[in-house]
Amino acid sequence: MHAIATDNLTKDYALGFWRKRPYRALDRLTLQVDPGEVFGFLGPNGAGKTTTLKLLLQLVFPTSGRAEILGRPVGDVGVRRRIGYLPENPYFYDHLTAIELLEYFGRLLGLSSAARAARVTRLLDQVGLGAERRLPLRRYSKGMLQRVGLAQALLNEPEVIFLDEPMSGLDPLGRRMVRELMLGLRDRGATVFFSSHILADAEAVCSRVAILAGGRLAASGRLTDLLAFGVNGWEVVVDEVSAEALGRVQAFSTKVTRIADRRYSIEVAPDTPPERALADLAAAGASVVSLNPLRDTLEDFFMRQVADRGHERTPVI
Amino acid sequence: MVLSAIALSVFRESVRDRIFYNLLLFAVLLVAASVLIGQMTAGQDVKIIKDLGLAATSLFGLFIAVFVGIGLVWKEVERRSVYSLIAKPVRRTELVLGKYLGLAFTLLVNVLVMAVVLYLLLAFMHWSSPENLRAAWEAPATDPALLKAFLLIYVQLLLVTAIALFFSTFAGPLVSMALTFGFYVIGHFNADLKHFDAVVTSAPLVWVLRALYYLLPNLAPFDITAQVVHGQAVPSGYLLMTIGYAAVYIAFLLAAAAHIFARRDLK
C-alpha cells in the first residue's frame, strides 16, 4: 500500500466573473509515495503544488481523477486522524494563544486532556516557541506562525504529513530545525510530503522528488537518477590575464566571462583536460585563483524542465 | 466532542471581541436610561422600562447575530484558517453546526444578561414605588411573563443567526449582511404578503406573493412585547407553535448551509 497515491488527478478552476473560462491548475497527475519516504514536491510558483495539496486534503474537489492516502479515499474523515498538514503561510485565530490553538485542535483530534497537555508543551518546545506561546496569535510574526503551524501539524503524531513550503518565512536556524524535524519524522517511520521551490532544502532531505511545471508532472524519481551528477566541464578563475593569454584560451574554452579588471572566469568543455588549460594560462603569466568542476544541480534541472514545459502550458481548454 | 470544541471556540472568540462588550454595555445603558424616560411619564414608567428593555435585547441581539453570524464561515475561509481545520477529522457539516451552536450559546448569554439587568431594574421599581401606584400597573413589575418575551426574542435571534450563516456559506460579508437584514425587515411585514389579493388583481402576482409568504420567514409572531407589557396572557400553545415554526425553518436553513458548504472548493 502506498502512503499517498494519485491517479490522473486533474483540477480546473473557473476564471472570470461573467464569462467563466476553465483554467487547468493540475493536469492528470499520477504519482505514488511509499511509506517512510521524504518526498519533495517541487516546482516554481503557480506550478500546481498547492492545488495538489488542497486536493489531497480535500479542501478542493477534483475535476477528474482520484487520490488516496494510506489506502483510503481523501474524503475519508477517519484518515485525517492519521495525517498532519501545514498550509502555505498558515493563518490561525487572532484571539487565541499558541497554547489555546493547539488545545483546540487537540480536542478536534480526539486527544485526551493528559495527552493534549503533554504534547502541546513538547511540540512548542520542539519548534522553538518560547514565552510568546502565551501571547495572542495576532501578535506573531510570519516565522512564529510558521512554527505554530508546524506544531499543529504534528499534534496527532501523524503517519503522513503534508508540508506546504515549510521553510517559508524562517531564518537559517529555523530552516535547519525544519530539516531535522523532517528527518526525525522519517526515522520514526512517517511519510513526509513537502512542497518547495527552494531546491537546496529539497536536496538536503529528499529521497525522491517530483517536479511539477505548468500543472503537469515534468519528472519524478530519485535525485541521483534525475540529475547528471557527472562533471559537465570545468570553471577556471584566473587573474592577471594578458591579452595574449586571452587569445590562447579562446581556442579551448566554451565561455569566457570577465569578472573584474584582469580577472576572468573561463569555462572548459569536459573533454579538454583542465591541466592543459592551467598550463597554457600559467605560461601566459596568469595566476590561477580556483578550479571548479561544473555539475548539474537540482536548480539547473529544475530550470531546464520549467523552460521545456513552460511553453507547453495550455491554460484555456 | 468536535461540535462542542468548535462551539466553544466561537464563544471564546465572541467574548474576546471588544465589539461584544460595547454592544452589551450600550444595551445595558439603554435599559438604565429607560428609568429616566419612565420618570418623565407619570404612571407609565414600568411599561416603558419593559418596552425598552425588550426592544434593546432584541436589537442588540440582532446586531450580534448578524455581524458575528455573517463572519462565522466566511472569515474562516477568507483568512484561510479553515485549511488547518479541515485537515483535522472534522466533517464540513460539523463545522457549520458547531459554528452555529457557538453563536447560539453566545446569544443565550447575551439575552440572559439583559434579562437579569431588566429584572433587577424592575425589582428596584417595585421596591421604590408606593402600594397605590403598584395597584395601577397592568402587570406586576417583576412579571414572570416577561420571560416568555425573552424566550421568543432568543428564538428569533436563533432564526436570524441561521439566515446569516446560510448566506455566509456562499456570499461575502456585505451581501450576507444586506440579505440578512433584508430578510429580517421583510420577515416583520411578511403577513401583509398573504393579504395582497385584496389590493392586487393579477392572479399570477397574487400567487408569487403567496409563495413568497410561505418561503420567507415570518418574524412578526416572535414579537409579543405588547401583550406581555400590557399584562395580556400568552398561551403556551402559541409559544410552542412559534418555537416549532422556528425549529423547522432553522433546520432547513442549516441543512442548506451544510449542503452548500460541503461541496464548496475552499480556494
Image: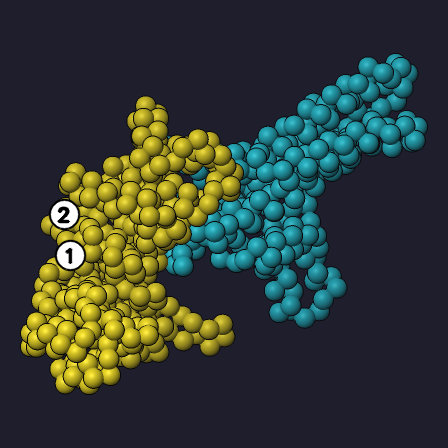
Chain colours: A yellow, B cyan
Question: Which of the marked residues, 2 or 1, is nearer the chain's N terminus?
Answer: 2
Q: Nearer the viewer, residue A231 or A33?
A: A231
Task: Find disc 1 in the rendering and name its residue.
Answer: A208
Look at the image and tell me whether residue B149 can be seen.
no
Q: Are marks 2 and 1 on the same chain?
A: yes
Determine the image quadrant of residue A297. Answer: bottom left
Vertical side of B219 occupied by B13: above or below: above
Task: Find disc 2 in the rendering and name its residue.
Answer: A35
Q: Nearer the viewer, residue B150 or A186?
A: A186
Q: Amino acid at mark 1?
A: Arg
Q: Chain of mark 1?
A: A
Vertical side of B168 occupied by A49: above or below: below
Measuring 45% from the left and 34% from the top, which residue is drawn there?
A132
Measuring 24% from the left and 71% from the top, which residue is drawn there?
A239
Look at the image and tell me whether residue A224 can be seen.
yes
Left or right: residue A182 compared with residue A152 = left
Question: How far across and down, in percent of the image, does residue A5 sit?
Answer: 18, 56
